[in-house]
């Protein structure tokens, strides 16, 4: 097939042998195609006539054919340099072909290159698998923590994700044992020895693991330890692929802690969407008086009053739950033996991954004692309402009486004020009487003076008549009469003076009594005024008490209605 000078006969024989198993093509030093065997033509999809005389660049991308690297490649071949590698080439129609090839310069007797022969093997499928595997590995390295171990557990390499997850630099882990990632107690345990013994037998391990990062920081991982087998099937290394699940583990622990806390503090029961009991915790069973075997598989209706079963409200209750609506209220339930149990509960539909309700979980608190206390409170509130209304009526009556007393005291105050005015008038009259008596006394004194002068004149007249003798007898009689009249006047004047003096004394006593009466009346008026003010204040206070009692009555009635309404809630 090939025509070489005699000096190359041996090489020619070798080429013919290779031609049966490899793709072979011959080029001139400028890259022009001279010949190609059937394996090559089959691999590239061409007939010989389609490629003979054309340049090697037919099999590469135009951009590569114009590149400096491509020119250097052919320059090296023209200098007699050998090239061997995996190459990406283009077959007929632009189809991608990967080959494992060696470009070998053909030398003449003087050792100068006169052509190039390429020996190639089509590795397209293997390359594609390798690329796919490489892509998968690259993807794994981008998304997962990867670490390699020798079979004795010593670390040989680790990617950035693993190092970041554990907080180490690469030089801090390479050459160290896997034990650095676990607690000393676990490293010395039988479980740890069995773990590595299984890996040395070629058994892969997959689970959630607690590991220790730098500084003893706790890290939780979901990991697969995969033994890598050598050509003889014996494990030669272990590769671990891991995902950091610390955050989700902590959330799960938090959720589990919350659920555990709820289970400890509340009654919890699970139903399927038809209302059949799936499970119930101790608090629920204790509250209702059942064993778990007595309720699992039974319908929720076993906990309600028989007359409610089959009602429209009860059917709608479960229809809403099946639609994903939750319920929260106070419910009256029936425990074992017909015992009434009151619960404050929420019925919560649980959604599956598609967002559809798959079961119902009820969280409940037993409030039976509270509801009994509420019933007692309702009774007490009713009694209180009756008492408040009675007190309100009594206060209302007292308020009316206080108003009547206030009116009576006002009239008494008016009478006392009238007495005060009359006493004042009497005092004024007494003063005028005293003044008149004083004036009369002055008149009496004047009369007494005149009577004394008349007595003196009559005495002089008597003396003169005695001197006159008989001639003065008549005058003496007149003088005697005048004297008698003067004596009578004096006596009458004395009597009048005494009467006036007695009248003045009585008037003084009357004035003193009237002053005392005026003082007493003034004090009485003050007392009456104070009493009127006190009664009015008492009336206002009583009215306020009455209003407050009426408001209290309304409030107590409202509380009674509210307590009664809460008690009547049931489903």
Image (cartoon, grey):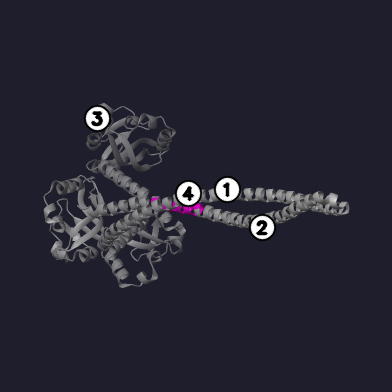
Q: CA distance from mark 3 to mark 2?
A: 182 Å
Tell me if mark 2 has few (under 14), some (14-19) or many (20+) residues whose alpha carbon lies within 10 angstroms of its own.
Answer: few
Residue with the mark numbered 4 = 411
Mark 4 and mark 3 in contact (Cβ < 8 Å)?
Answer: no
Measure the alpha-carbon separation of dots 4 and 1.
Answer: 15 Å
Q: Name the residue at 53% across, 54% down.
A: 530
The answer to whether mark 1 and mark 3 are in CB contact below 8 A is no
Residue 119 location, x and y as percent?
A: 30, 41
First along the sequence among labels 2 and 4:
4
Find out whether residue 36 is within the magenta segment: no
Image coordinates for residue 44, horizontal then vertical, percent: 25, 34
Tell me which numbered mark, 1 or 3, is placed earlier along the sequence.
3
- Which badge, 4 or 1, comes first in the chain's sequence? 4
Q: Are marks 1 and 2 in contact (CB under 8 Å)?
A: no
Quadrant where the N terminus lies? top left
**Precedes in sequence: disc 3 or disc 4:** 3
Of callouts 1 and 2, the N-terminal one: 1
Q: Which region is colored magenta?
A: 532-546
On the image, numbered disc 2 is attached to which residue?
Answer: 502
- Residue extending furthest front? 470
Marks 1 and 2, how far apart in space?
Answer: 27 Å
Horizontally, residue 62 falls left or right of residue 286, namely right
Please give the label number shown on residue 48: 3
Can residue 302 be seen at all in this image of the molecule? yes
Relative horizontal placement of residue 324, taking residue 475 as reference (left or right):
left
Question: In terms of sequence position, does the residue under pointer 3 or pointer 2 come before the other?
Answer: 3
* C-alpha distance separating marks 3 and 4: 146 Å
């Amino acid at each position: 097939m090939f025509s070489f000078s005699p000096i190359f006969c041996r090489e020619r024989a070798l080429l013919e042998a290779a031609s049966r198993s490899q793709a072979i093509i011959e080029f001139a030093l400028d890259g022009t195609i001279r010949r190609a065997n059937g394996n090559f033509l089959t691999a590239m999809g061409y007939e010989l006539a389609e490629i003979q005389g054309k340049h090697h660049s037919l099999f590469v991308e135009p951009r590569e054919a114009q590149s400096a690297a491509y020119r250097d490649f052919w320059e090296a071949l023209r200098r007699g340099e050998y090239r061997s590698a995996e190459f990406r080439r283009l077959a007929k129609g632009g189809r991608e072909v990967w080959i494992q090839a060696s470009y070998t310069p053909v030398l003449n007797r003087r050792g100068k290159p006169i052509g190039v022969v390429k020996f190639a093997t089509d590795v397209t499928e293997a390359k594609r698998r390798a690329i796919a595997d490489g892509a998968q590995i690259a993807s794994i390295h981008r998304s997962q923590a990867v670490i390699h171990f020798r079979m004795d557990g010593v670390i040989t390499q680790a990617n950035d994700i693993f190092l970041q997850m554990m907080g180490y630099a690469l030089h801090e882990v390479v050459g160290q044992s896997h034990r650095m990632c676990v607690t000393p107690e676990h490293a010395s345990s039988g479980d740890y020895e069995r773990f590595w013994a299984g890996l040395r037998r070629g058994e892969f391990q997959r689970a959630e693991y607690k590991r220790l990062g730098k500084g003893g920081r706790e890290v939780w991982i979901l990991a697969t330890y995969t033994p890598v087998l050598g050509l003889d099937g014996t494990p030669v290394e272990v590769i671990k692929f891991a995902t950091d699940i610390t955050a989700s583990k902590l959330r799960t622990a938090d959720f589990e802690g919350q659920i555990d806390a709820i289970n400890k503090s509340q009654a919890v029961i699970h139903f399927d969407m038809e209302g059949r009991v799936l499970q119930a915790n101790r608090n629920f069973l204790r509250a209702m008086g059942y064993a778990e075997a007595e309720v699992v598989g039974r319908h929720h209706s076993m906990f309600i009053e028989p007359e409610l079963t089959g009602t429209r409200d009860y059917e709608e209750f479960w229809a809403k739950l099946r639609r994903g609506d939750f319920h929260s209220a106070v419910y009256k339930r029936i425990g074992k033996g017909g015992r009434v149990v009151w619960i404050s509960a929420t019925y919560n539909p649980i959604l599956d991954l598609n967002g559809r309700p798959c079961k119902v979980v009820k969280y409940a608190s037993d409030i039976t004692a509270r509801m009994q206390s509420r019933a007692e409170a309702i009774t007490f509130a009713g009694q209180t309402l009756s008492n408040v209304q009675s007190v309100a009526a009594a206060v209302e009556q007292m308020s009316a009486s206080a108003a009547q007393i206030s009116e009576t005291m006002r009239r008494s105050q008016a009478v006392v004020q009238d007495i005060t005015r009359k006493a004042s008038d009497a005092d004024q009259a007494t003063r005028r009487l005293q003044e008149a008596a004083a004036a009369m006394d002055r008149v009496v004194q004047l009369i007494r003076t005149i009577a004394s002068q008349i007595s003196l004149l009559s005495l002089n007249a008597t003396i003169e008549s005695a001197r006159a003798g008989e001639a003065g007898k008549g005058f003496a009689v007149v003088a005697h009469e005048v004297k008698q009249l003067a004596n009578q006047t004096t006596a009458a004047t004395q009597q009048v003076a005494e009467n006036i003096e007695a009248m003045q004394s009585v008037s003084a006593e009357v004035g003193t009594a009237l002053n005392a009466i005026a003082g007493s009346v003034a004090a009485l008026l003050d007392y009456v005024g104070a009493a009127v003010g006190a009664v009015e204040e008492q009336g206002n206070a009583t009215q306020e008490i009455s209003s407050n009692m009426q408001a209290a009555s309304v409030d107590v009635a409202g509380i009674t209605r509210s307590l009664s309404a809460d008690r009547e809630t049931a489903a």
